[in-house]
Image (tube, rainbow, N blue to C red):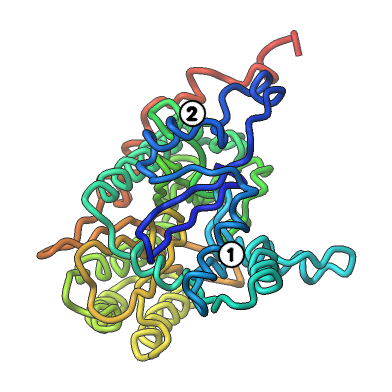
């Protein structure tokens, strides 16, 4: 609920939400909006103890302070995660605004903290985010179930993109195709803006313009997932635009795939990310030694990929394999120490050949259980032969061609 304030009072163990009053004109235009007048309905839907109008918040805080001088208030210090937005983008949104000499507004959280300090200096303020972040890092069975569904929908959309992509297709057409698959099967929105990057656009990890027409002989990177019940996923695959990997693409992608699988094969509970990286590097170096490259700069790029991964395994500040996933795509929580049951994250190492604008990256969603790691997206093809076979199938874009190109009506 926008403009709602939730107070969890540890002294009397009561949960209160403060809401605006009903605006009949808004409801006449938009439909039902939960308000302070809907106390019984809000309590039945949420399990909260009390519903009060927003103007009561100041009086109630004052009463708490009178009863418990020097009380602590824990409130959010970090920017809220908006639609299709993780905290990292929320922070960037705020810093962009602060850097603009014609704007400079603080975050809503900073504004709220400032008001609390001005109006109730007797309270001690502390950051609630670290507590919530730790809770969010370990997922419950129900959370895992919803994340699996988001991952399945992401994978189904990428499967359909593999069937539909061909030279002449515009990147944003695959965005539309994926949205159809997501929404048709129960998604309520995007987990993040779609990263559908063909040819020279792929090296930009967060490219999302979607305006380029794909060409024969190029590779396409598709990184996109939905929001299902306020839980996200994050899955990426590479595919040849024309349906067949070229000889050079097979060499580079094939090496990357073996290195990528070496990481997946070593992920398990009870060991640290750096331990997994060190084990994977042993397999990567064996693959590199025996792999055939027709171009020496491609071998150098592969060696650089392995060297970089090995370096990260020795760095104290890189004690994670990828990033967490949950209520945000780049979820919160410190993924340090041994992997624990309930952790959900992705891996997404990238191989680059900068001088040729080649960028190869895949990403899978992983759930850590008590005795094993579940690769939720492993049914999505990554082997060359499996991708090429799937791409022979007719796709939705072929069954429903672009009317602008095939009708005199436009």
Q: Residue at x 57, y 19 (%)?
A: 401
Q: Residue at x 69, y 67 (%)?
A: 115
- Say the numbered circle drawn on residue 62: 1
Q: Nearer the viewer, mark 2 or mark 1?
A: 1
Q: Is residue 135 left or right of residue 130?
A: left
Q: Is residue 72 visible?
A: yes
Secondary structure beneath dot 2 equals helix
- Residue 282, image x, y percentages: 23, 82
Q: Residue furthest top?
A: 409
Which of 38/347 is in front? 38
Q: Is residue 85 left or right of residue 130?
A: right
Question: What residue is pinned by disc 2?
Answer: 180
Q: Is residue 291 left or right of residue 186?
A: left
- Residue 137, image x, y percentages: 34, 65
Q: Is residue 265 left or right of residue 22?
A: left
Q: Is residue 266 above or below residue 9?
A: below
Which picture quadrant has residue 46?
top left
Q: Is residue 193 visible?
A: no
Q: Earlier in the sequence, mark 2 or mark 1?
A: 1
């Amino acid at each position: 609920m926008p403009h709602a304030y939730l107070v969890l009072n540890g002294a009397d163990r009561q949960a209160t939400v403060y809401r605006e009053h009903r605006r009949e004109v808004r409801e006449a235009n938009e439909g039902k909006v939960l308000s302070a007048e809907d106390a019984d309905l809000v309590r039945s839907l949420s399990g909260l103890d009390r519903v009060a109008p927003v103007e009561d918040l100041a009086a109630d805080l004052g009463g708490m302070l009178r009863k418990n001088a020097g009380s602590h208030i824990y409130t959010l210090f970090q920017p809220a995660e908006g639609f299709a937005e993780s905290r990292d983008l929320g922070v960037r949104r705020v810093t962009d605004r602060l850097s603009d000499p014609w704007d400079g507004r603080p975050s809503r959280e900073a504004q709220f903290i400032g008001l609390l300090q001005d109006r109730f200096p007797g309270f001690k303020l502390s950051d609630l985010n670290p507590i919530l972040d730790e809770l969010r890092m370990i997922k419950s069975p129900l959370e895992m179930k919803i994340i699996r569904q988001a991952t399945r929908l992401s994978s189904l959309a990428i499967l359909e993109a593999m069937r539909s992509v061909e030279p002449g297709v515009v990147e944003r057409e695959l965005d539309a195709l994926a949205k159809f698959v997501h929404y048709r099967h129960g998604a309520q929105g995007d987990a993040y803006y779609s990263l559908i990057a063909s040819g020279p656009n792929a090296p930009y990890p967060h490219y999302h313009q979607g305006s380029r027409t794909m060409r024969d002989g190029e590779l396409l990177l598709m990184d996109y997932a939905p929001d299902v019940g306020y839980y996200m996923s994050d899955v990426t695959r590479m595919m040849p635009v024309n349906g067949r990997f070229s000889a050079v693409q097979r060499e580079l992608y094939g090496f990357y795939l073996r290195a990528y699988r070496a990481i997946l094969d070593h992920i398990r509970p009870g060991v640290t990310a750096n331990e997994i990286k060190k084990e994977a590097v042993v397999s990567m170096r064996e693959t590199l030694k025996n792999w055939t490259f027709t171009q020496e700069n491609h071998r150098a790029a592969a060696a650089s990929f392995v060297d970089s991964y090995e370096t990260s395994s020795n760095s104290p500040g890189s004690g994670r394999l990828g990033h967490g996933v949950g209520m945000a795509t780049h979820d919160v929580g410190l993924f340090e120490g041994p992997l624990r049951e309930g952790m959900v994250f992705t891996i997404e190492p990238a191989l680059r050949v900068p001088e040729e604008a080649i960028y190869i990256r895949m990403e899978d969603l992983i759930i850590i259980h008590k005795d094993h790691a579940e690769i939720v997206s492993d049914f999505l093809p990554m082997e060359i032969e499996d991708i090429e076979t799937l791409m022979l199938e007719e796709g939705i874009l072929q069954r429903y061609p672009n009317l602008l190109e095939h009708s005199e009506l436009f």
